[in-house]
Amino acid sequence: MKRVRVIVDGRVQGVGFRYFVADGAKQHNIKGHVRNLPDGRVEIDAEGESENLHHFLSVCKQGPAHSQIDAFMVSDAPVFGFERFRLRT
């Protein structure tokens, strides 16, 4: 089990990015959350098996059709034990 926190910068708010991430989390059995930050970035807090997490992050880096990702910063975090993946505001 591994947990990462990701900050995504670019055109990632108002383009369905959080829903795109949540769908990817469901597909890859990832738990945690995604939320918009006040400065226009998006934060992803995700945990799962290493291989699933790797594939999930690859999907997130692509983003939905109208997004533009300028920076994708990943940092490791201690495992929390999330029970599901959810959208936060």
Image (tube, rainbow, N blue to C red):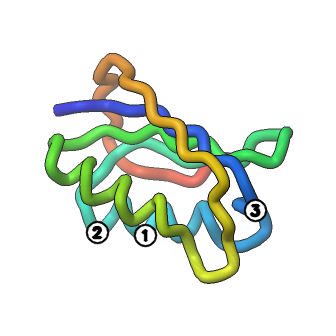
Image disc number at residue 11: 3
Quadrant location of residue 27?
A: bottom left
| Residue 43 on image: x %, y % | 60, 41
Label 1 sits on what residue type? Asp
Q: Which residue is mark 1?
A: 23
Which SS class for mark 2?
helix
Quadrant location of residue 65?
A: bottom right
Which SS class for mark 3?
strand
Which SS class for mark 1?
helix
Classify residue 88 as left or right of residue 83.
right
| Residue 10 vs residue 25, the one in the foreground | 10
Per the model, the C-alpha gap separating discs 1 and 3 is 19 Å
Quadrant location of residue 59?
A: bottom left
Residue extending farthest bottom: 65
| Residue 21 vs residue 26, the one in the foreground | 21
| Residue 74 on image: x %, y % | 46, 35
Number of other residues with Cα within 10 Å of mark 2, as a class: few under 14, some 14 to 19, many 20 or more: few
Label 2 sits on what residue type? Gln
Number of other residues with Cα within 10 Å of mark 1, as a class: few under 14, some 14 to 19, many 20 or more: some
Residue drawn at point x = 43 percent, y = 27 percent: 75
Looking at the image, is mark 3 or mark 2 earlier in the sequence?
3
The N terminus - image quarter: top left
Q: Which residue is mark 2?
A: 27
Label 3 sits on what residue type? Arg
Contact (CB < 8 A) between labels 2 and 1?
yes
